[in-house]
Structure formats: C-alpha cells, structure tokens
Amino acid sequence: MTLADPSTSIIRDTELWHLDAVSQAELIRHGRASSRECVESSIARVRSVNPALNAIVLLLEEEALASADDADAKRRRGEVLGPLHGVPVTTKINVDQAGLPTDGGVREFRDLVAHEDAAVIANLRRAGAIVIGRTNTPAFSMRGHTDNALHGATLNPWDSSLTPGGSSGGAGSATAAGMGTIAHGNDIGGSIRWPAYCNGVIGLRPSIGRVVRVNSTAAPGRPMSSQLMAVDGPLARTIRDVRVAFEAMSASAPSDNRWVPVPTRLSPRDRPVKVALVTRSEGISVQPYVWDCVRTAGRYLEAAGYHVEEISPPDLHETSELWHAIGVTEQVHLLGPRVRACSDPGIITFLEHWWELKPPRDFKGYMHAFVERDILLQRWFAFLEQYPIVVMPSAPQRPLPAGVDVEGREGARRMLDALYFQLILPVLGIPGLAVPLGFHDGAPLGVQLVGQRYREHMLLDAGEVIEAFEGVRKPIDPRP
C-alpha cells in the first residue's frame, strides 16, 4: 500500500514498511492505515529483500496477519491501544516464543519448542507489537559474525562482503533493510551494539536488570557471566523507536530475580551535562577515522549545550580484558562440552582460537576476577558521577570482512580486537547506545554512548542530538 491521503503528515507515496514504528502506530491509531496493511507491507518487503540477506529465518505470515486483524478489531471497538499497537517487529531465534523453536542457530536445538513467550516478548506484545519473523544468530550466540550450520549466513545490506555482526546480526540486517520497524536483540559482549554498528542502525544495551531475561526452555540456573552481563534490548532506525521499544521491553515481570523497578526516566542531572570523549587508547590500535567520529559526536553535543572534554574513564584496557577472565573461564568449563558435541564447525573453530588467545583462569584467578571487577566498578562509577555520558568508539575500525573470525588464529584475533570497546560495558553492567555516524569506504560507522546505570534516557537524549545532525537512516536495498 502507498499513502494517498495528503492530510497525513507522512510523505505521500511512501511505502508503509519504510516508516518507523512511531509513525506506523500513529497512522493505525488514527485510522489512516490498518495494522493489516502495515504488516502486509512489511511481509512484502521481507519477501523482496530477505532472499538476498537471510536475516529473517522464520517468516510468521499467517500468525502475524491474524494478529493484525485482531489489532484492527480492537481499534474499531475503541479499546485502549498500546504504544506499538499493530506495528510489525522481529524477534531473535534465541529467545522463547510460544509454539516456536528456540534453536539459537544450533541444529541439535531445532526441536526445542517453547510453550510460552519469554517475558520480553510478552511485554512487546502487551504494547501492541506484532511479531512478523525470527532473526538469525550464530550458533550459541557466541560469534561476532552471524552464520550457523542450521540457517546459514546473514549478509550485511550495505556490503555483502562485510559482516552484519553478531550475535544479533539478523536483527541488525533486517532493521537496516526495512524488514520490521523494531528488532529484539540481546547482548552479553556487544551482541546488540556491534551489529548496530555494522548495519548502520541504533542499538540500546540497557543496564543490567532493566529488561527481564528468562527463557523457560533453558536449563534452570544461569552462569555468573549471564547473571552479571546478559541483557535484552532493541535495535531500530530511529531514536524514538528505540525509546518506545525500551519502555515496552522494560515493563515489569516477576520471572527474573534481576529485574529492578526503576523508572525509565530518572530525575534530571545538573546542566550542562558533562561529556567525556575517549580519543586515545593504550590497549588497541584505532583507525584515525574512528577517532574522527568520536570528535564529531563531541562537536554535535557541544553545539547542543553539553560540556565536552577529551578525557578517558579509568582502566579501559583492564575492564575490556576482565570480560575474558570471567566469560572465557566459564565458556571453557560450561559451554565447551556442548559446543564440541554440536555439528557447527564455525563456532567450534572460533571458540577454540578465542580460548587460545585469551586463556581461562584457574579457580583462584576466576574468583579474583570478581574482586577486580568490584574495584573497577568503584572507579568507573566515580568517573560517571562527574561525566554522566562517555562517547567512545564502537569498534577500532570499519566492520570486518564476513567470516574473518573463523580464518584461523589471526582471524579470531581480529574479531576479538573489533569487540574491544564492546566488552567494557557488560563487565560493569552499565548501559550503552550505538548510534550511526558517518561512513568509511561505503561502510557505516558510529559511536557508542555510555552512561550511568539506569540512566538510559540520558543516552537517548544525547543520541537524538547526533541523529538530528546526521539525519535519520532510511531503509536500504541490499547491495552486492
């Protein structure tokens, strides 16, 4: 469908799939478009571009259209409508959705069918969202590139030779190409922010405990790394869509003992808000065009009234390396046997090289890692009290070539280097917002906004400033 009503504020002849979630919800709420029309438009877009990308690995056409008809009936009856009423979204294949497999890209899990929605999916549905498809992820969600033996590889719509990132690579690719307005993702080591960077979209990693994260199909009891670092959050093309998705996802649910009943907008900070720009790094080589992006973001924020300084938070390198001390140690002992028993050579190759490059600690070293974390938390929180927003690179360079992480030990090292800045936030449990900014040789670039725990709204406010200067990223057609 195209919009033929000139009274609408939306540009005439714009395809519905091209609009963001807030615009679609407004049209549906005022009867200028139906939910069925929005869902049909998105499904047509999936059929048009997904064969070239393999971002959505399960299209839910029949279920989505039935839900759209129900949403339209509710509007006609005058029922109270949620902020995402009738809007098409996508979910990731590693989160429970009733009646569907939570396969996580693993052949051995293809028959692991969920009997109920995970709370984050239930929260999206309560806000009115309609799930049209499930997005791809690497096996066990443990690669920075999205490929697996069950569903195959996902491609980057900007350049098929580049990785779409991982593990929410399908979510990032689908969002960039206009397949759904908002994508569900999750992040334990950059799995929302890295794909957002690679695909030129926006991704929010919330604070730990903000969004309920429990899968009933998973074995009871979560490893310490998951308890401290794993979160769910949204990817989208506009800040306002990320904001409304975050509000929906973070609704209460008693199923996760980590969930915290904190308002999504806390009391304002004193003005002007101080911003720290990370413009140097001792632990990793960073390309000059990446530093240019950070400084450009700083200029945008300064023009909007923020007080900007080039100063780095404490112990960047130590914090990034501490992820491996905790995460790798657990991977080797808890995930290793499961990975070696699966039929996915890619994940086996990458993890074994990762564990060689970043060896696990012994028990004493593993326990001491949490002492180190406590010290880092004190230093970081003191810094963030003075500088509530930090702008740092998302990655040291442009998105990597697709599949480089399984090209031997050197390929694995390149991927771990690419995730260097991503690993910092999970260790600390603090929020981060990936915002697109600029290009290099045709590949999207961006920055990472980092803030105080539970103050995601400050990052979104700052992100809106960058978005205003850079312009909203429109959906793109897949490029070779």
Image (spheres, rainbow, N blue to C red):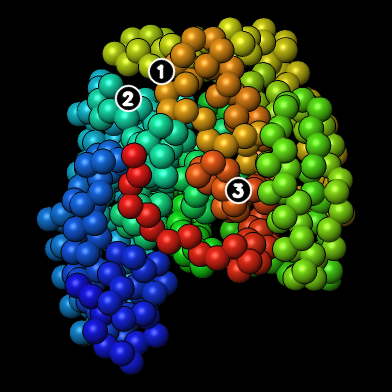
Numbered badge on residue 471: none
Task: Identify the element where label 1 is drawn.
Answer: helix
Q: Residue at x 35, y 13 (%)?
A: 345
From mark 1 to mark 3, how far is it between C-alphas?
Answer: 27 Å
Work out whether mark 2 precedes mark 3 in sequence or the reverse, and give the earlier one.
Answer: 2
* Residue 296 on image: x %, y %: 72, 55
Q: Amino acid at mark 2?
A: Asn
- Disc 1 marks which residue? 347
| Percent of width and height locating residue 41 | 22, 64
- x and y, in percent, of residue 359 in the image: 63, 9
Which structural element holds mark 2? loop
Q: Amino acid at mark 3?
A: Gly
Residue at the image position 26 percent from the left and 41 percent from the top: 52
Check if mark 1's residue and mark 2's residue have beta carbons within 8 Å: yes
Identity, as a three-letter code, of the amino acid under mark 1: Ile
Residue matched to label 2 = 148
Tell me the CA gap for discs 2 and 3.
27 Å
Say which quarter of the image contains residue 316: top right
Q: Residues within 10 Å of mark 3 (few under 14, many from 20)?
A: many
Q: Quadrant of residue 127?
A: bottom left
Residue located at (61% from left, 11% from top): 357
Using the rendered image of the protein, determine whether residue 125 is visible from the camera's viewpoint: no
Vertical relation: 15 (above or below) 318: below
Q: CA distance from mark 1 to mark 2?
A: 8 Å
Disc 3 marks which residue?
446
Image quadrant of residue 16?
bottom left
Q: Are marks 1 and 3 in contact (CB under 8 Å)?
A: no
Q: Is residue 223 left or right of residue 88?
A: right
Q: Residue furthest front?
A: 441
Quarter of the image with the C terminus is top left
